[in-house]
Image (spheres, helix red, strand yellow):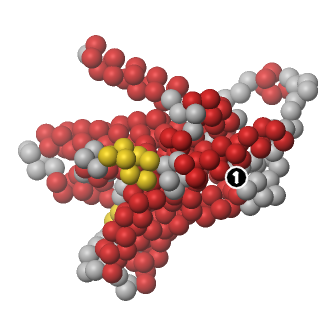
Amino acid sequence: MALFNSIWDDLKFSLRTGNMITKLVVINFAVFVVTKLAYLILGGFTLGNPGGLYATGLDYFCIPASLSTLIWQPWSYITHMFLHDSFWHLFGNLVGLYIFGSIVSDLIGDRRVLPLYLLGGLAGGTFYIFSAQVGILNVSSYALGASAAVMAMGGAALILAPDYRVHLLLLGAVKVKYIVLVLVLIDLATISGNFDSGGSIAHIAGFVTGCIFVYQLRDGRDWAEFVNQILRKITSLFTFTSAATKKTPRKNKPGPMKATYVGSKGNNVSDAHDLSFQEKLDGILDKIKQAGYEGLSQEEKDFLYEASQK
Protein backbone atom coordinates (compact mmCIF):
# COMPACT_ATOMS: atom_id res chain seq x y z
CA MET A 1 0.00 0.00 0.00
CA ALA A 2 2.88 2.35 0.79
CA LEU A 3 4.27 1.76 -2.71
CA PHE A 4 0.96 2.69 -4.39
CA ASN A 5 0.65 5.78 -2.19
CA SER A 6 4.15 6.82 -3.20
CA ILE A 7 3.34 6.37 -6.91
CA TRP A 8 0.09 8.31 -6.50
CA ASP A 9 1.94 11.14 -4.73
CA ASP A 10 4.51 11.26 -7.56
CA LEU A 11 1.74 11.49 -10.16
CA LYS A 12 0.01 14.30 -8.30
CA PHE A 13 3.31 16.14 -7.96
CA SER A 14 3.99 15.82 -11.70
CA LEU A 15 0.52 17.12 -12.56
CA ARG A 16 0.89 20.00 -10.14
CA THR A 17 4.43 21.16 -10.97
CA GLY A 18 5.30 19.76 -14.40
CA ASN A 19 4.98 21.57 -17.69
CA MET A 20 2.12 20.75 -20.06
CA ILE A 21 4.10 18.07 -21.91
CA THR A 22 4.72 16.25 -18.63
CA LYS A 23 1.05 16.54 -17.69
CA LEU A 24 -0.13 15.17 -21.03
CA VAL A 25 2.30 12.25 -20.81
CA VAL A 26 1.14 11.44 -17.27
CA ILE A 27 -2.55 11.70 -18.22
CA ASN A 28 -2.20 9.44 -21.26
CA PHE A 29 -0.22 6.87 -19.31
CA ALA A 30 -2.62 6.97 -16.36
CA VAL A 31 -5.63 6.44 -18.66
CA PHE A 32 -3.86 3.45 -20.23
CA VAL A 33 -3.21 1.92 -16.80
CA VAL A 34 -6.85 2.42 -15.80
CA THR A 35 -8.10 0.69 -18.96
CA LYS A 36 -5.83 -2.29 -18.38
CA LEU A 37 -6.92 -2.52 -14.75
CA ALA A 38 -10.51 -2.51 -15.99
CA TYR A 39 -9.61 -5.39 -18.33
CA LEU A 40 -8.24 -7.40 -15.41
CA ILE A 41 -11.25 -6.66 -13.21
CA LEU A 42 -13.66 -7.63 -15.97
CA GLY A 43 -11.72 -10.85 -16.39
CA GLY A 44 -12.60 -11.76 -12.82
CA PHE A 45 -16.31 -11.21 -13.46
CA THR A 46 -16.36 -13.05 -16.78
CA LEU A 47 -14.28 -16.09 -15.77
CA GLY A 48 -11.28 -14.99 -17.80
CA ASN A 49 -13.13 -13.88 -20.94
CA PRO A 50 -13.41 -10.08 -20.68
CA GLY A 51 -12.80 -9.38 -24.39
CA GLY A 52 -16.34 -8.65 -25.54
CA LEU A 53 -17.39 -6.67 -22.50
CA TYR A 54 -14.09 -4.79 -22.43
CA ALA A 55 -14.32 -3.87 -26.13
CA THR A 56 -17.89 -2.67 -25.69
CA GLY A 57 -16.89 -0.43 -22.79
CA LEU A 58 -13.83 0.86 -24.65
CA ASP A 59 -15.89 1.78 -27.71
CA TYR A 60 -17.96 4.00 -25.46
CA PHE A 61 -14.94 6.35 -25.21
CA CYS A 62 -13.56 5.90 -28.75
CA ILE A 63 -14.74 8.20 -31.51
CA PRO A 64 -17.23 6.37 -33.75
CA ALA A 65 -17.35 6.57 -37.52
CA SER A 66 -21.15 6.68 -37.35
CA LEU A 67 -22.73 10.10 -36.80
CA SER A 68 -25.79 8.52 -35.20
CA THR A 69 -23.54 6.84 -32.62
CA LEU A 70 -21.54 10.04 -32.04
CA ILE A 71 -24.74 11.90 -31.11
CA TRP A 72 -25.20 9.56 -28.14
CA GLN A 73 -21.59 9.76 -26.97
CA PRO A 74 -20.36 13.28 -27.83
CA TRP A 75 -17.69 13.13 -25.10
CA SER A 76 -15.79 10.64 -27.29
CA TYR A 77 -14.72 13.60 -29.45
CA ILE A 78 -12.36 14.47 -26.56
CA THR A 79 -11.79 11.16 -24.75
CA HIS A 80 -10.54 9.30 -27.83
CA MET A 81 -7.37 11.41 -27.99
CA PHE A 82 -6.29 10.30 -24.50
CA LEU A 83 -7.12 6.61 -24.99
CA HIS A 84 -4.80 3.77 -26.07
CA ASP A 85 -5.41 0.03 -26.11
CA SER A 86 -1.94 -1.09 -27.21
CA PHE A 87 1.23 -0.39 -25.21
CA TRP A 88 3.32 0.21 -28.34
CA HIS A 89 0.71 2.61 -29.69
CA LEU A 90 0.93 4.50 -26.40
CA PHE A 91 4.73 4.34 -26.30
CA GLY A 92 5.16 5.71 -29.83
CA ASN A 93 2.76 8.55 -29.20
CA LEU A 94 4.38 9.51 -25.90
CA VAL A 95 7.84 9.58 -27.47
CA GLY A 96 6.56 11.77 -30.31
CA LEU A 97 4.67 13.98 -27.87
CA TYR A 98 7.79 14.52 -25.79
CA ILE A 99 10.07 15.25 -28.76
CA PHE A 100 7.78 17.52 -30.78
CA GLY A 101 5.98 18.99 -27.77
CA SER A 102 9.23 20.08 -26.14
CA ILE A 103 10.18 22.02 -29.27
CA VAL A 104 6.76 23.67 -29.41
CA SER A 105 6.88 24.52 -25.71
CA ASP A 106 10.38 26.01 -25.94
CA LEU A 107 9.70 28.14 -29.01
CA ILE A 108 6.13 29.42 -28.66
CA GLY A 109 5.36 28.80 -25.00
CA ASP A 110 3.97 26.11 -22.73
CA ARG A 111 0.49 27.69 -22.70
CA ARG A 112 0.06 26.83 -26.39
CA VAL A 113 0.82 23.12 -26.01
CA LEU A 114 -2.57 21.93 -24.73
CA PRO A 115 -4.60 24.01 -27.24
CA LEU A 116 -2.51 22.63 -30.10
CA TYR A 117 -2.92 19.08 -28.76
CA LEU A 118 -6.68 19.47 -28.54
CA LEU A 119 -7.02 21.15 -31.94
CA GLY A 120 -4.96 18.41 -33.57
CA GLY A 121 -7.06 15.69 -31.95
CA LEU A 122 -10.32 17.41 -32.89
CA ALA A 123 -9.19 17.89 -36.49
CA GLY A 124 -8.16 14.25 -36.68
CA GLY A 125 -11.50 13.10 -35.30
CA THR A 126 -13.43 15.34 -37.69
CA PHE A 127 -11.65 14.11 -40.81
CA TYR A 128 -11.89 10.50 -39.63
CA ILE A 129 -15.69 10.86 -39.39
CA PHE A 130 -15.84 12.71 -42.70
CA SER A 131 -13.86 10.00 -44.49
CA ALA A 132 -16.24 7.39 -43.07
CA GLN A 133 -19.25 9.26 -44.44
CA VAL A 134 -17.72 9.61 -47.90
CA GLY A 135 -17.26 5.84 -48.01
CA ILE A 136 -14.44 5.84 -50.56
CA LEU A 137 -11.70 4.58 -48.23
CA ASN A 138 -11.47 1.66 -45.85
CA VAL A 139 -12.30 3.07 -42.41
CA SER A 140 -12.78 1.18 -39.13
CA SER A 141 -15.89 1.60 -36.97
CA TYR A 142 -14.05 3.29 -34.09
CA ALA A 143 -10.80 5.24 -33.63
CA LEU A 144 -8.70 6.05 -30.59
CA GLY A 145 -5.27 7.40 -29.73
CA ALA A 146 -3.30 10.65 -29.50
CA SER A 147 -1.60 10.23 -32.90
CA ALA A 148 -3.43 13.13 -34.59
CA ALA A 149 -2.64 15.41 -31.63
CA VAL A 150 1.03 14.32 -31.72
CA MET A 151 1.20 14.93 -35.47
CA ALA A 152 -0.12 18.44 -34.81
CA MET A 153 2.92 18.92 -32.57
CA GLY A 154 5.08 17.48 -35.32
CA GLY A 155 3.67 19.86 -37.93
CA ALA A 156 4.24 22.84 -35.63
CA ALA A 157 7.79 21.68 -34.83
CA LEU A 158 8.50 21.25 -38.55
CA ILE A 159 7.59 24.87 -39.27
CA LEU A 160 9.23 26.28 -36.13
CA ALA A 161 12.57 24.45 -36.16
CA PRO A 162 12.98 22.10 -39.15
CA ASP A 163 16.72 21.71 -38.57
CA TYR A 164 16.49 20.91 -34.87
CA ARG A 165 18.39 17.64 -34.27
CA VAL A 166 16.88 14.83 -32.24
CA HIS A 167 19.03 11.96 -31.00
CA LEU A 168 17.30 8.69 -31.88
CA LEU A 169 18.30 5.23 -30.74
CA LEU A 170 20.45 3.45 -33.37
CA LEU A 171 20.10 6.36 -35.82
CA GLY A 172 21.89 9.12 -33.92
CA ALA A 173 21.12 12.80 -34.53
CA VAL A 174 18.29 13.28 -37.04
CA LYS A 175 16.73 16.59 -38.04
CA VAL A 176 13.08 17.12 -37.15
CA LYS A 177 12.09 17.76 -40.76
CA TYR A 178 13.16 14.25 -41.78
CA ILE A 179 11.37 12.57 -38.86
CA VAL A 180 8.10 14.40 -39.53
CA LEU A 181 8.22 13.96 -43.30
CA VAL A 182 8.84 10.21 -42.97
CA LEU A 183 5.80 9.93 -40.69
CA VAL A 184 3.70 11.87 -43.19
CA LEU A 185 4.87 9.68 -46.08
CA ILE A 186 3.97 6.54 -44.14
CA ASP A 187 0.45 7.87 -43.58
CA LEU A 188 0.08 8.85 -47.23
CA ALA A 189 1.21 5.38 -48.30
CA THR A 190 -1.33 3.83 -45.94
CA ILE A 191 -4.13 5.97 -47.37
CA SER A 192 -3.22 5.02 -50.94
CA GLY A 193 -3.10 1.29 -50.10
CA ASN A 194 -5.83 -1.13 -49.17
CA PHE A 195 -5.37 -0.63 -45.44
CA ASP A 196 -7.46 0.88 -42.66
CA SER A 197 -7.05 4.51 -43.73
CA GLY A 198 -9.12 6.22 -41.04
CA GLY A 199 -6.25 6.63 -38.62
CA SER A 200 -3.84 7.88 -41.30
CA ILE A 201 -6.36 10.47 -42.50
CA ALA A 202 -6.66 11.68 -38.90
CA HIS A 203 -2.85 11.89 -38.64
CA ILE A 204 -2.58 14.01 -41.78
CA ALA A 205 -5.38 16.28 -40.53
CA GLY A 206 -3.50 16.75 -37.26
CA PHE A 207 -0.25 17.47 -39.11
CA VAL A 208 -1.88 20.12 -41.31
CA THR A 209 -3.52 21.68 -38.24
CA GLY A 210 -0.13 22.05 -36.56
CA CYS A 211 1.36 23.75 -39.62
CA ILE A 212 -1.56 26.16 -39.99
CA PHE A 213 -1.47 26.88 -36.23
CA VAL A 214 2.07 28.28 -36.50
CA TYR A 215 1.42 30.22 -39.71
CA GLN A 216 -1.66 31.80 -38.13
CA LEU A 217 0.38 32.70 -35.06
CA ARG A 218 2.96 34.41 -37.23
CA ASP A 219 0.20 36.51 -38.74
CA GLY A 220 -1.04 37.57 -35.31
CA ARG A 221 -3.96 35.14 -34.94
CA ASP A 222 -3.39 33.07 -31.82
CA TRP A 223 -5.73 30.08 -31.90
CA ALA A 224 -4.39 29.03 -28.52
CA GLU A 225 -5.89 32.08 -26.82
CA PHE A 226 -9.37 31.18 -28.05
CA VAL A 227 -9.00 27.59 -26.82
CA ASN A 228 -7.59 28.72 -23.49
CA GLN A 229 -10.54 31.06 -22.99
CA ILE A 230 -12.92 28.14 -23.46
CA LEU A 231 -10.89 25.99 -21.08
CA ARG A 232 -10.93 28.75 -18.46
CA LYS A 233 -14.71 29.01 -18.72
CA ILE A 234 -15.07 25.25 -18.31
CA THR A 235 -12.68 25.24 -15.38
CA SER A 236 -14.58 28.09 -13.72
CA LEU A 237 -17.69 25.91 -13.63
CA PHE A 238 -15.87 23.56 -11.26
CA THR A 239 -14.17 26.28 -9.25
CA PHE A 240 -15.99 27.57 -6.20
CA THR A 241 -15.00 31.11 -5.37
CA SER A 242 -16.21 32.84 -2.24
CA ALA A 243 -18.48 35.85 -2.63
CA ALA A 244 -16.03 37.97 -0.69
CA THR A 245 -13.29 37.18 -3.16
CA LYS A 246 -15.52 38.10 -6.08
CA LYS A 247 -16.48 41.45 -4.55
CA THR A 248 -12.98 42.47 -3.51
CA PRO A 249 -11.83 45.30 -5.79
CA ARG A 250 -8.45 44.84 -7.39
CA LYS A 251 -6.31 47.91 -7.91
CA ASN A 252 -3.90 48.40 -10.74
CA LYS A 253 -5.28 45.40 -12.56
CA PRO A 254 -3.18 44.88 -15.67
CA GLY A 255 -4.91 44.98 -19.01
CA PRO A 256 -5.35 41.82 -21.04
CA MET A 257 -2.18 40.53 -22.69
CA LYS A 258 -2.37 40.54 -26.44
CA ALA A 259 -1.42 37.46 -28.42
CA THR A 260 2.28 37.42 -29.19
CA TYR A 261 4.36 35.20 -31.39
CA VAL A 262 8.06 35.08 -30.71
CA GLY A 263 8.88 34.11 -34.27
CA SER A 264 11.43 35.64 -36.54
CA LYS A 265 8.95 37.47 -38.80
CA GLY A 266 6.89 39.28 -36.21
CA ASN A 267 4.17 40.21 -38.68
CA ASN A 268 1.34 42.35 -37.30
CA VAL A 269 1.75 41.03 -33.78
CA SER A 270 1.45 43.14 -30.65
CA ASP A 271 4.05 42.45 -28.00
CA ALA A 272 4.33 43.53 -24.38
CA HIS A 273 8.12 43.38 -24.52
CA ASP A 274 10.36 46.21 -25.61
CA LEU A 275 11.99 46.31 -29.03
CA SER A 276 15.41 45.08 -27.87
CA PHE A 277 13.80 42.03 -26.29
CA GLN A 278 11.95 41.16 -29.51
CA GLU A 279 15.04 41.78 -31.62
CA LYS A 280 17.03 39.36 -29.49
CA LEU A 281 14.29 36.75 -29.84
CA ASP A 282 14.20 37.23 -33.60
CA GLY A 283 17.95 36.84 -33.79
CA ILE A 284 17.92 33.62 -31.78
CA LEU A 285 15.14 32.09 -33.88
CA ASP A 286 16.93 33.05 -37.09
CA LYS A 287 20.03 31.34 -35.71
CA ILE A 288 17.98 28.18 -35.02
CA LYS A 289 16.85 28.13 -38.64
CA GLN A 290 20.43 28.35 -39.85
CA ALA A 291 22.36 26.20 -37.37
CA GLY A 292 19.70 24.33 -35.39
CA TYR A 293 18.87 24.52 -31.70
CA GLU A 294 22.20 22.93 -30.76
CA GLY A 295 24.01 25.87 -32.34
CA LEU A 296 22.77 28.18 -29.58
CA SER A 297 24.94 29.16 -26.65
CA GLN A 298 23.75 28.25 -23.16
CA GLU A 299 22.90 31.92 -22.53
CA GLU A 300 20.72 31.98 -25.66
CA LYS A 301 18.99 28.74 -24.65
CA ASP A 302 18.27 30.15 -21.20
CA PHE A 303 16.91 33.37 -22.72
CA LEU A 304 14.67 31.39 -25.09
CA TYR A 305 13.34 29.26 -22.26
CA GLU A 306 12.52 32.32 -20.13
CA ALA A 307 10.78 33.95 -23.10
CA SER A 308 8.62 30.86 -23.69
CA GLN A 309 7.33 31.05 -20.11
CA LYS A 310 6.02 34.61 -20.55
From where the camera sits, is residue 75 visible?
no
The C terminus sits in image quarter: top right
Front residue (pair 207, 167): 167
Q: Dot 1 lies on which element? A: loop
The N terminus sits in image quarter: top left
Q: Amino acid at mark 1?
A: Ser
Residue 271 point in image, percent of width and height: 81, 45
Residue 257 point in image, percent of width and height: 80, 41
Please, which residue is most extreme toward the left here? 47
Residue 244 point in image, percent of width and height: 80, 21
- The residue carrying pointer 1 sits among few (fewer than 14), some (14 to 19) or many (20 or more) residues within 10 Å by Cα, namely some
Rendered view: 243 above or below 127: above
Direction from residue 22 to residue 308 in the image, left or right: right
Front residue (pair 149, 267): 267
Direction from residue 65 to residue 49 in the image, left or right: left
User: What residue sits 27% from the left and 17% below the top?
Assistant: 3
User: What residue sits 18% from the left and 57% below the top?
Assistant: 52
From where the camera sits, is residue 126 visible?
yes
Direction from residue 171 to residue 43 in the image, left or right: left
Residue corresponding to mark 1:
264
Front residue (pair 10, 153): 153
Residue 225 point in image, percent of width and height: 70, 49
User: What residue sits 32% from the left and 46% below the top?
Assistant: 172
Total residue callouts: 1
Direction from residue 46 to residue 19 in the image, left or right: right
Q: Quadrant of residue 47?
A: top left
User: What residue sits 41% from the left and 71% below the top?
Assistant: 201
